[in-house]
Image: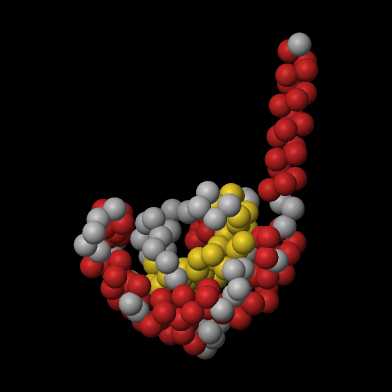
Amino acid sequence: MKYLIQTTALCLFFAGSAFANEFESELKDLASGKIAEIAASEEVVSAVIAQNGDTASYDQSKIDELDAKWREEADAVDQPMIDEVLEKPLSVYLADTQDASDGLFTEIFVMDAKGLNVGQSDVTSDFWQGDEAKWQETYSVGKGAVHVSELEEDDSTQTLQSQVSVPVFDPASGDVIGAITFGVNVENL
């Protein structure tokens, strides 16, 4: 009986792993095509460069303070910090890009050199992404980096989604200046 339980658990583990990576090839193709094109757009690059100038001196204490404020506002009626970010031209561009994707993109957000949100198509649960793989495995790695998350089912839309992240580069210097993450509805690939 113990052997049967272990075998069943092992089979479920490997079945889950195969399912989690089922769309990885298509997602990486999307990352090197449409996503890379958006990451290199003037709207994204100029907004990241501008915010990097504003946040360059931020230490971890300041980042934590901003992230805590964002999280508090996410559950509040009054959301001045969140509203300020959502009203930025970059956020409007990202929302328009998401709307034009015919349901392929479920969210888009851009991060600066500190991992702080620069702009986003929708509200994120937190403001600082610098402690997450989506930023660490793209911004910190640089050229050629792509982070593809495991598949998750969105309870509200009942769709399978994965996050795809790539670095954002300064076209003049070639330096990594930030990162961008797309929620992708894999059923629309």
* Nearest the eye: 93 or 129: 93
* Nearest the eye: 36 or 122: 122
* Position above or below: 96 against 145: below
Q: Identify which residue is drawn at 54% across, 55% down.
A: 157
Q: Identify which residue is drawn at 71% across, 51% down.
A: 21
* Residue 10, image x, y percentages: 74, 29
Q: Do we see residue 122 in this rendering?
A: yes
In this rendering, the count of numbered labels is 0
Q: For this view, does 32 lie left or right of residue 84?
A: right
Q: Which of the 4 quarters of the picture holds residue 14? A: top right
Q: Do we see residue 69 in this rendering?
A: no
Classify the position of the C terminus by image quarter: bottom right
Classify the position of the N terminus by image quarter: top right
Q: For this view, does 14 lie left or right of residue 156?
A: right
* Position above or below: 133 against 146: above
Q: For this view, does 15 lie left or right of residue 141?
A: right
* Residue 167, image x, y percentages: 55, 70
* Residue 44, image x, y percentages: 47, 80
* Nearest the eye: 53 or 75: 75
Q: Which of the 4 quarters of the picture holds residue 84? A: bottom left
Q: Identify which residue is drawn at 26% across, 67% down.
A: 81
* Residue 19, image x, y percentages: 72, 46
* Nearest the eye: 121 or 29: 121
Q: Residue furthest front?
A: 157
